[in-house]
Image: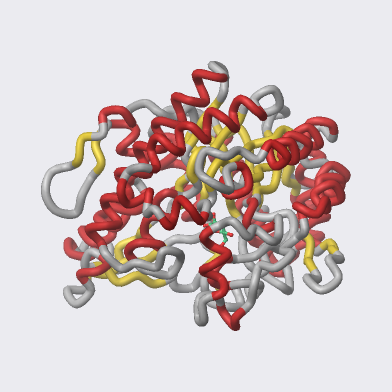
């Protein structure tokens, strides 16, 4: 018998998460398709191309893999640009394709979670600058109603807009993702429109499906002051947290959207528009006050010292931050789903340690009776990582983009063992990451 076993509730969902644009391939009606073709947009000029060829039908084999590995859920997104390729013209075949996918999940015993918008938008919507003008609110509401009506018989768990904080920041403030603007004032206007669009979609889904659970997935990055106790670092860390990580969830709790200067913006229609906290955690930031960095609210960020970094130095494996993130989610007193968590790692050694250490933090949260109901690892198969192209590999399964062949990484087997048993045991740690055993299971 294992020296110790950490059990999760029997109803706990074990899944993986992904997004349409990143796996479907040839999403040619999306704004991101045009962006990809721009020189310098994607690292090394890489392209999404066929991606994981889900639109060509390979979702079936991937869902088989997830089911064979004992997963019980899967989060995917539907592509607005496929469903409404031209304004107000619905592609019923595309909706049917998605219907088959969610039915395919159900048939395999996997609970579907569906995201309506994950970064990419229809080209026509981007050309009309609808996120900036606010026109998006009514359009997104209409689209949400259409999708909920088409898929509602098979889907109860919904996400409206993936990572509104990342979407707003990277596309309109940092200028990395389309439409590649660097205008803080505009980014804040977009944030308000995103929030209103979410609220409208929340109501549209509930009108069709009163019992649906609807959430707004937040990219949560805990911030640690570089010098605890030093007031300016504390202020910079808190400000970054409030205006990035907590911005949207607080707005939903209070009906007020914080702004860096001046009073909060009243968005009363957003109040109470989430049924659960959709938590996405990858890494944490150390923040020090830096007067020369007004663009980032006078904070200078770095990854936590001593934490293990991925090969590209993009993310650090910092499990304590996951616990903080869960604690933050818990304070809203709503159910919690971890809708993304993972690390890019071609070699997979880091991913195995990451999984074990992060799931241990999740188990702690469960043991405090925080209402965490499921965990979706990012991701099942390597997928197209936006401006980082194929240089970051997040899959439990490695993808050869030339041949479309998938190869399980050891983490696929590890995650399967956890999902099957609903538990994390000292035996698994001894087998997959023996160097962690003494620290995780002393005595
Ligand atoms: C996004 C995903 C992305 C992942 C890993 C998340 O912020 O929602 O689309 O692939 O990070 O980079």
Residue 358, percent from left and from top: 60, 53
Residue in the image at 69% along x and 57% along y: 23
Q: How is the image coloured?
A: secondary structure
Residue in the image at 25% along x and 41% along y: 257
In the picture shown, does residue 317 fall above or below 61?
below
Quadrant in the rendering for residue 200 = top left
Residue in the image at 27% along x and 62% along y: 228
Give the quadrant of the N terminus.
top right
Residue 211, percent from left and from top: 56, 18
Q: In terms of depth relative to the viewer, which is nearer, 440 or 133?
A: 133
Q: In terms of depth relative to the viewer, which is nearer, 207 or 399?
A: 207
| Quarter of the image where ligand 1 sits | bottom right
Residue in the image at 66% along x and 45% along y: 76
Q: Is residue 59 visible?
A: yes
Quadrant in the rendering for residue 311 = bottom right
Residue 65, percent from left and from top: 85, 49
Q: In terms of depth relative to the viewer, which is nearer, 247 or 433?
A: 247
């Amino acid at each position: 018998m294992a020296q110790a076993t950490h059990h999760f509730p029997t109803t706990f969902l074990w899944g993986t998460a992904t997004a349409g644009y990143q796996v479907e391939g040839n999403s040619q009606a999306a704004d991101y398709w045009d962006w990809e073709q721009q020189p310098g947009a994607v690292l090394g000029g890489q392209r999404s191309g066929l991606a994981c060829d889900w639109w060509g039908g390979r979702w079936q084999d991937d869902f088989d893999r997830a089911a064979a590995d004992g997963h019980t859920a899967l989060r995917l997104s539907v592509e607005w640009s496929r469903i409404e390729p031209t304004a107000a013209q619905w592609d019923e075949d595309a909706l049917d394709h998605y219907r088959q996918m969610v039915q395919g999940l159900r048939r395999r015993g996997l609970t579907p979670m569906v995201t309506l918008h994950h970064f990419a938008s229809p080209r026509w919507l981007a050309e009309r600058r609808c996120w900036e003008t606010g026109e998006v609110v009514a359009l997104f509401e209409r689209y949400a109603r259409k999708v909920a009506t088409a898929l509602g018989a098979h889907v109860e768990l919904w996400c409206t807009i993936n990572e509104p904080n990342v979407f707003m920041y990277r596309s309109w403030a940092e200028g990395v993702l389309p439409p590649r603007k660097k205008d803080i004032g505009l980014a804040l206007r977009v944030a308000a429109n995103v929030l209103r669009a979410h609220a409208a979609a929340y109501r549209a889904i509930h009108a069709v499906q009163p019992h649906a659970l609807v959430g707004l997935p937040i990219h949560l990055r805990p911030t640690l002051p570089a010098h605890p106790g030093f007031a300016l670092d504390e202020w910079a860390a808190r400000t970054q947290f409030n205006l990035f990580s907590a911005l949207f969830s607080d707005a939903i709790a209070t009906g007020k959207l914080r702004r860096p200067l001046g009073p909060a913006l009243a968005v009363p229609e957003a109040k109470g528009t989430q049924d659960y906290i959709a938590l996405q955690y990858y890494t944490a930031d150390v923040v020090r006050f830096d007067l020369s960095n007004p663009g980032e609210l006078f904070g200078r960020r770095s990854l936590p010292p001593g934490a293990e970094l991925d090969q590209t130095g993009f993310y650090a494996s910092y499990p304590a931050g996951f616990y903080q993130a869960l604690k933050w989610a818990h304070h809203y007193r709503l159910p919690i789903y971890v809708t993304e968590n993972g690390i890019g790692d071609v070699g997979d050694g880091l991913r195995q340690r990451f999984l074990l250490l992060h799931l241990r933090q999740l188990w702690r949260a469960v043991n405090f009776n925080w209402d965490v109901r499921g965990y979706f690892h990012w991701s099942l198969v390597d997928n197209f990582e936006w401006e980082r192209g194929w240089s970051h590999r997040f899959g439990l399964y490695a993808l050869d983009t030339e041949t479309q062949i998938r190869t399980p990484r050891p983490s696929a087997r590890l995650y399967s063992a956890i999902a099957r048993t609903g538990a994390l045991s000292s035996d698994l740690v001894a087998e997959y990451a023996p160097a962690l055993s003494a620290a995780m299971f002393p005595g």
